[in-house]
Image (tube, rainbow, N blue to C red):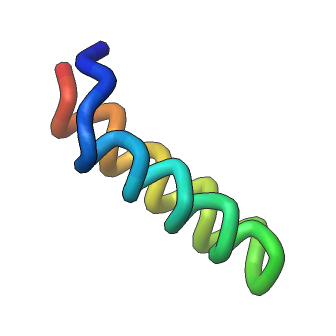
């Protein structure tokens, strides 16, 4: 995986969503993984 601004932003989003809703975090992570592949 590339380590660039977008990935850092994604990690930040996942962290924020995780504190709000673990389910949304999991969904977002799944979508991100599909996009990166």
Residue ID at (61%, 54%): 26
Residue ID at (66%, 74%): 16
Decide if residue 34 is on the left or right side of residue 15: left
Q: How many marks?
A: 0
14 relative to 36, above or below: below
17 relative to 11, above or below: below
Q: Which picture quadrant has residue 10? A: bottom left
Residue 3 picture location, percent across and down: 32, 23
Residue ID at (33%, 50%): 31
Residue 33 picture location, percent across and down: 34, 33
Compare residues 28 and 10 and report the one nearer the observer.
Answer: 10
Residue ID at (44%, 44%): 30
18 relative to 29, above or below: below
Considering every residue shown, the one lying at the far bottom of the view is 20
Viewport quadrant of the C terminus: top left
Residue 23 picture location, percent across and down: 69, 68
Viewport quadrant of the N terminus: top left
Decide if residue 27 is on the left or right side of residue 17: left
Decide if residue 34 is on the left or right side of residue 8: left
Residue 15 picture location, percent across and down: 68, 61
């Amino acid at each position: 995986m590339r380590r660039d601004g977008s990935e850092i932003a994604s990690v930040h989003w996942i962290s924020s969503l995780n504190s709000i809703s673990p389910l949304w975090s999991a969904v977002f992570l799944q979508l991100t993984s599909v996009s990166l592949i």
